[in-house]
């Protein structure tokens, strides 16, 4: 009986090991993959693409930042940000909307200003704004009816974060 059990265990072991060798065998020769690799844009921690070339939809087509931050303009922008924007945005913390620190590493200055000035159209037409809307549970950014001067001051303040 013991000899039969030992033979059975050895037979099972040999059959089990033999099966793996066949599965791991590879045929040498020409291989071709038909899958096309697509390059995806970099994504933020939210999973939204980073696109510094997208200028958004709105009146702002070009923004030039000086090398040095305009501290007077940034102070005015900080006041506006703290009065209006902190209901949904914090500099370093995700809230109803994204954290604003490092925004210019993810978005162009034109995109940021168009989002501030023209959120209604941006949320309907801009692919990144749509992705952010989805990422943030369809919490829409309301139009605060800021002037271009006020939006530019907020944009300058965001550079300081």
Image (spheres, helix red, strand yellow):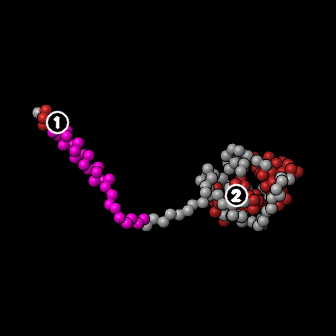
In the rendering, which numbered label is found on residue 6?
1
Q: Residue furthest left?
A: 1
Distance between the Cα atoms at labels 2 and 1?
70 Å
Q: Circle 2 sits in a helix, a strand or a loop, which is it?
A: loop
Camera-side residue: 88 or 12? 12
Q: Residue furthest top?
A: 2
| Observer able to see residue 119 | no
In the rendering, which numbered label is found on residue 46?
none
* Residue linked to disc 2: 107
| Observer able to see residue 156 | yes
Q: Quadrant of residue 56?
A: bottom right
Q: Which residues are magenta?
A: 6-33
Using the image, determine if residue 146 lies above or below residue 10.
Answer: below
Position of 30 with respect to 58 (left or right) is: left
Q: Quadrant of residue 52?
A: bottom right
Q: Is residue 137 magenta?
A: no
Camera-side residue: 91 or 132? 91
Question: Where residue 48 appears, x then y in whole percent?
Answer: 61, 56
Q: Quadrant of the N terminus?
A: top left
Question: Where residue 131 appears, x then y in whole percent?
Answer: 62, 58
Q: Which numbered disc flags the more N-terminal residue, 2 or 1? A: 1
Label 2 crowding class (10 Å Cα cut-off): few <14, some 14-19, many 20+?
some
Position of 38 with respect to 1 (left or right) is: right
Of badges 2 and 1, the one in the foreground is 1
Q: Which residue lies at the image location 80% right of the left edge and 51% below the top edge?
A: 157
Question: Where residue 94 appears, x then y in whole percent?
Answer: 67, 46
Position of 103 with respect to 70 (left or right) is: left
Q: Which residue lies at the image location 50% right of the left edge and 63% below the top edge?
A: 37
Q: Circle 1 sits in a helix, a strand or a loop, which is it?
A: helix
Using the image, determine if residue 58 lies above or below residue 74.
Answer: below
């Amino acid at each position: 009986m013991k000899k039969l059990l030992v033979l059975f265990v050895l037979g099972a072991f040999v059959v089990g090991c033999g099966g793996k060798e066949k599965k791991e065998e590879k045929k040498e020769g020409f291989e071709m993959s038909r899958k096309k690799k697509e390059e995806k844009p970099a994504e933020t921690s939210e999973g939204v693409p980073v696109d510094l070339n997208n200028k958004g939809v709105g009146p702002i087509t070009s923004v030039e930042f000086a090398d040095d931050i305009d501290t007077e303009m940034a102070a005015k922008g900080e006041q506006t940000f703290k009065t209006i924007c902190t209901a949904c945005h914090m500099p370093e913390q995700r809230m109803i909307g994204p954290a604003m620190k490092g925004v210019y590493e993810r978005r162009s200055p034109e995109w940021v200003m168009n989002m501030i000035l023209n959120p209604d159209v941006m949320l309907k037409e801009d692919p990144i704004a749509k992705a952010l809307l989805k990422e943030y549970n369809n919490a829409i950014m309301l139009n605060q009816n800021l002037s271009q001067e006020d939006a530019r001051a907020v944009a300058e303040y965001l550079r300081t974060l």
